[in-house]
Amino acid sequence: MKDATQGRVFGRTQLEDLVIVPLFALVAALFLGALVMAATGVAPGTIAQSYAALLKGSVGSIDAVSETLTAALPLVLAGLGLALGFRAGLFNIGAEGQIVMGGLAAVVAGVALADFPAFIALPGALLAGAVTGAFYAGIAGWLRAATGAHEVISTIMLNLISFRLLDYLLRTPLIQKEGRADPISKSVPDVAELPKLLTFLDANLRLHAGLFLTLVMVAAAYWLLFRSKLGFEFRASGENAIAARFAGMNAGLTIVMAMAVAGALAGLAGANQTLGVLGRATPGFSAEIGFDAIAVALLGRSHPVGVLFAGILFGALEAGGRQMQVDAGVSIDLIGIIQSLIIVFIAAPLLVKAIFPWGFRKAGTGKGRS
Amino acid sequence: MQVELRNITKRFGPVVANKDVNLTIEPGEVLGLLGENGAGKSTLMNVLCGLYEPTEGEILIDGRPVAFKGPGDAIRAGIGMVHQHFMLVPVFTVAENVILGIEPVGRFDHLDLKAARAEVKKLSTEYGLTVDPDATIETLPVGVQQRVEIIKVLFREADVLILDEPTAVLTPQEVDEFIQIVRSLCDAGKAIVFITHKLNEILEISDRIAVIRRGEIVGSGDPKKLTRPELAEMMVGHPVDFDVARAPFAPKEVILDIQGLTLVRDDGAVAVDDLSLQVHSGEVVGIAGVQGNGQSALIEALAGLRRPVAGKVTFDGTDITDASARERHRMGIAHIPEDRQRAGLIGNFTVAENMVLDSYYGPPFAKGAGINWGRVEEEAAAVAEQYDVRTPSVHAAAAHLSGGNQQKLVVARELSRDTRLVIAGQPTRGLDVGSIAFIHERLMAARDEGDGVLIVSSELDEIMALSDRILVMFKGRIVAEYAPHEAPVDKGTIGLAMAGAAT
């Protein structure tokens, strides 16, 4: 297989890096999760039962798969944006805020386009989400490029601003649902909704057309990163900003563009939630997806295909975790612990290699230099 | 103490780094170990200092075989290595660095820094090293830091000192001082292994020379009887032509005109001060000078990476003072950056990606918003071939190439298109003889085709070999100008100007 990540044949090193390390990280995290349960007095039988429930709740039925994918879609979309940012050397913490702004804008646009047919209303609402997310993230990019303000700080602050802005806007007459006193938006009209895909099987299955949107975006992100001029600039700036500048690339513009593209994808993740799952915007509707997506991007090694699989894994953990709580009475917080442990292991590949030495080529066969 | 390497072979998997090497190191003698980058010099010495275990063969000290399990064993046996990259704690003093790892302790585990300082002082005077034990490392010039590394090895009572490319980081004056130090160590009965790829130095410093190529000792001899071309041929494997062939000097119109250029460093200090110079088409202008006299800032400004605070730069009649790097690139200005790894290449990018780093955006490589990678790879393979960039494929990461091939890659990228002015900073720093000759040839070819060429280098030999006109830069100004094609120029005269004597 030829992989354009490095523009060379997909080799053993990439296999270790992209597949084996994450896989072992998952195994190690599940094992430690079991230890945590055992240490807190959960009986071995219950531990086995909870992991069985995890499996059943994530892939054990059509309903489980539907829930897994539904949970995975926004993680993948936002994770793609973060991955692009990482590749460009930007540590964007602001996906959460971009999801909020994008999701809300999609609702507002959907409501405004209620009288149009679906083929205008839905793309219009999605576009509004993407553009708003791009603009919101672009602020942080512009601050970085023009003033040197670090994007970690500015995106965290933009997150806080977005939460309060959401609470405030949800009470303004333009957005608030008629006749309600609590902060809740008008409902998304049918024409702007992402249609459910599996209602012919069961009316309760939540999987929606955001699936196609997400798959298209995975392909688009791959093309952008590895096949386009802009992606070449992103990767060059991320790998060696000085060499990129010496090669005549515009550093400031690259930063703004990378942030804007990341924001557009996070905005789409928000629109995916409001148009596909929730049908409206409420306080806190972003549900920390933007933060989980950071983990997804890291686990996916900032590679679009990796992000897709990582997002599905995290979606599965979330859907399975709910089942775990129901069947075995184990708190869903444990899933949060397992997710975090996976990232810890991913961040420490040497640790993974030390625990599972047989999955890797022997170290120390590097060539000597004179 | 006599050390003998007998039939040493070192393999890394299928790669043979050293093959059947026999070498004797005698006390009171400087053994020069000469070889190109990647020939296996450092691997061999890492075997000797205990970092690697040999795959086959043995090490004998005074006739007795020894086995080193790690660097500690080698140090205890009296073998010490001074690495190319210093291993010093910048905020510690000289004495603290010297004792690091084997701290002398008094009663109650009290650190006996006094004894350490006395010992450092003693070693310093004994071998003429003149190092203040209380100086903080980060305040010391590179040459002195190197002496601290030598003291570290002496403090551990080494009788055999291995010096890995010791002169690479030194200025010409520091090299002279360094040679003195090596002499005094030798006179005191120490055995010295001097690793280098520089022919002049090895001839000057060694008592005996061994040449290593592709992991094997291919020749050895007495420096008094060997000549530079002979050594170069042994090292490279084929005859090397030191004289760069060039067409008769026939300068045409002014291609680059700098008037009153003033540049300020990031910290506010003036780097280039009201500097004016001209480069003609078909002319090589060499700027000599000790590093840190504003050359880097000048190059960056000419490449469009630094805004001047005053002055005007004209290229072929067009004012380019405020033109961006890309605009200049498009006009046909090639720029070979001083530091290939920091500014010239992206290590994790492939050879193909690096080859189009500054030309990916236009025809023939761009295809709408995308890049035609098939075309890029084709072109990169052809250019790599043409410029002798030795790489397993265009998909290999640039970081995996040797220094010489990395630099040839940069040169290939910059010169393989239609150029009218070439700006080259330290174009051959740290390279082997073969690569140097190749790059010099290419720069000269650009001149012969009618390009203006501006070379900035701290290697005076390089400046003298290439330049039609030599300018000396000192404290941000041009302080002297020589025209070798009119009257021969003496190296010493230029050296004095470089030291500021002309002002």
Image (tube, rainbow, N blue to C red):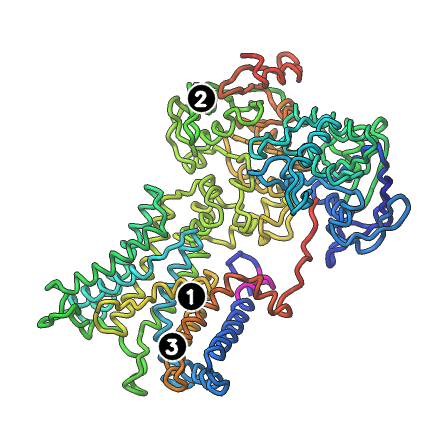
Of the numbered discs 1 and 3, the one sitting upstream in the chain is 1
Q: Confirm whether circles 3 and 2 share one chain.
A: no
Instruction: Choose top left, top right, bottom left or bottom right for residue A279.
Output: bottom left
Alpha-carbon span between mark 1 and mark 3: 18 Å
- Secondary element under disc 2, as helix, strand or loop, is strand
Q: Determine if the magenta segment contains residue A16.
A: yes
Q: Which residue is mark 3?
A: A332
Instruction: Choose top left, top right, bottom left or bottom right for residue B438.
Output: top right
- Kindly give the residue lying farthest to the front in the view shown: B107
Q: Could you tell me the amino acid type at mark 1?
A: Val
Q: Which residue is mark 2?
A: B258
Q: Is residue A239 above or below residue B299?
A: below
Q: Residues within 10 Å of mark 1 (few under 14, many from 20)?
A: many
- Residues shaded magenta: A9-18
Alpha-carbon span between mark 3 and mark 2: 69 Å
Question: Relative to A152, is B244 on the left or the right?
Answer: right
Question: Relative to B79, is B425 on the left or the right?
Answer: left
Which chain contains the residue that carries disc 3? Answer: A
Q: Is residue A356 above or below residue B473?
A: below
Residue A28 x, y percent position in the rendering: 53, 72
Q: Which residue is mark 1?
A: A296
Q: Could you tell me the amino acid type at mark 2?
A: Ile
Location of the C terminus of chain A (image quadrant): top right
Location of the N terminus of chain A (image quadrant): bottom right
- Secondary element under disc 3, as helix, strand or loop, is loop
Question: Relative to B266, is B1 on the left or the right?
Answer: right
Residue A23 x, y percent position in the rendering: 53, 71
